[in-house]
Image (cartoon, grey):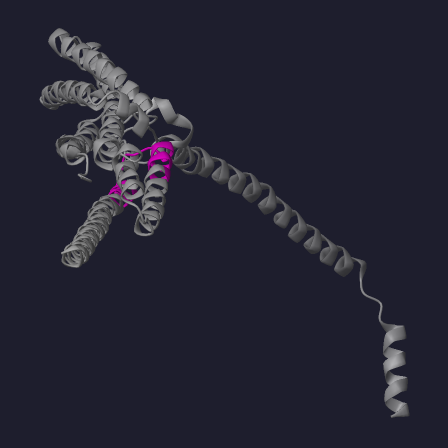
Amino acid sequence: MDKLDDDIKSSQKNYNPSSDFVETTLQQINNQHQTAHRRFKVWIPTLAGALVLLAIFIIIPLHDNNKSGGVFEGPSSSKSSSIQSYPTSQAAANGSSANGTNNASLTSDLNSVNNSISQESSDQSSANSALNDQSQEIAIPTD
Amino acid sequence: MIFIHIDRIASMKHRLAAMLSLTVVSGLLLTGGVVSADSSTTATAASTKTTNQQTRLQNIISKGDQEIERRLTTLSTLTSKINAATYLTANDKSTLSSEVSSTTSGLTSLKTQLDSDTTVSSAASDVNSIYTEYRVYALVAPKVDLIKVADDQQTVQSRLTTLSQKLQTRITAEQKTGKNLSSMQSELSDLNSKVETAHSISSNIESSVINLQPSDYNTNHELLTGDNNQLKTAHSDDQAADTDAKNIVSALKTM
C-alpha cells in the first residue's frame, strides 16, 4: 500500500498537461456554452410568440363569446334579475361567422323565436281558461 | 114550617158551596192544563229551532270546508305552474310564489277558524271571507296566467329584436353588393314596429297586473278582462313580426 501511495504522489507531481490541451478544452467548453445560449435566444421568443398567437386567436374570442353570445336580457321591466340564457347564434357557437348573420345563425334565431311564441300561445290559452273560471268565484250560500 | 125552611136554605147553601167549589176546581184545572200546554209547545219550538240552527251551522261549515279545499288544490297547481314556467322573470316568479303561498296559509287558517265556529253568523262570515278576501278564482289564478303570458311575450319580443339587428346587418351587407332589398327593408321596418307596439303592451300589463290585490277585484270585477284583450293584441303583433322575420330569412337564403 505504501508503495502504491508513493506512486500516486509521484504521478501527481509529474502531471503537467500541455497548454494546447488546456486551451482546446476551454475552447470546447466555451463553444458548448455559446451554442446553448443561441438555442435559448431562439426558442424563448418563439415560445412567447406562440403564446401571443394562442391568446389572440383562441382564448380571447372564446372569452368574448361566453360573455356576449349566450346571454339574453329578459323583459325590460325587471332587467336586473331576469337574465335568461338561450342560444343566440349557432354560427357564433361553432365559430363559422363572427357576427352571427349567416343563414344557419338566422335560422337558429328564428327557431328560438318560434319556440317562445309557441309557449306564449299555450299560456294565452291557459289565461283564457283561467278568466272563464272566474265564474267559480260565486257567493257561497249560507241561508 | 120555619125549621123546614131553614133546613132548605141550609141545603141550598151546601149545594151552592159545592157548585162554587166545583167551578173553582174546574177553573183551576182548566187553567193549569192550558198553561201546561203552552209551555210544552214553547219548549218544543225552542228545541226545534236549536236543532235547525245546529244543522244550518254544520251545513255552512261543511260547504265552506269544501270550497276552501277546492281552492287549496287550485293553489297547489298554481305553485307547480309558477315553478315550471320557463320565461317568468325572477321578480315575477318570486312575487307570484309569495302571493300563492300567503293565500294558501290564509285559507288554511280560515278553515281552522271556520271548523271551530259555534254560531251561524260567525260561520257565515268566515265563509264569505273565502271569496271576498282571497279571490283565488277571480284574481289569483288568472293573474298568474296573465303574467306568464306577458313575460312570454317579452321574451319573444327580445328575441325578435336580436334577430332584427342581425337581419339589418345582413341586409346592409347584401345592399353593399348592389342588390335592391327595399321590400325586405320595408318588411324589417314592419317587424320592428310590431315588436315595439307589442312590447309596450306586454310590459305595461306585467307591471300593472302583478300588483293587483283581491280588494281591487272587489271594486271592479272586469279589471282583468281588458288586460287579457290587450295581451291578445300583443300576441297578434308578435305573430305578425315573426311572419316578417320568416319571410326575410327565407329571402336571404336565396341570395
In the rendered image, the vertical position of residue B54 relative to residue B155, given as above or below: below
From which residue to which does the magenta span run?
B78-98
Q: Residue furthest bottom?
A: A1
Residue A122 seen: no
- Percent of width and height locating residue B116: 34, 52
Magenta span contains residue B79: yes
Secondary structure mainly formed by the magenta segment: helix
Tell whether A29 sits left or right of B51: right
Tell whether B5 sits left or right of A13: left
- Percent of width and height locating residue B147: 26, 29
Residue nearest the observer in this picture, A3 or B163 = B163
Q: Quadrant of the N terminus of chain B?
A: bottom left
Residue shown at 16%/11% (left/top)? B190
- Percent of width and height locating residue B153: 23, 26
In the rendered image, the vertical position of residue B20 relative to residue A62, given as above or below: below
In the rendered image, the vertical position of residue B240 relative to residue B101, given as above or below: above
| Residue B79, image quadrant | top left
- Percent of width and height locating residue A13: 90, 74
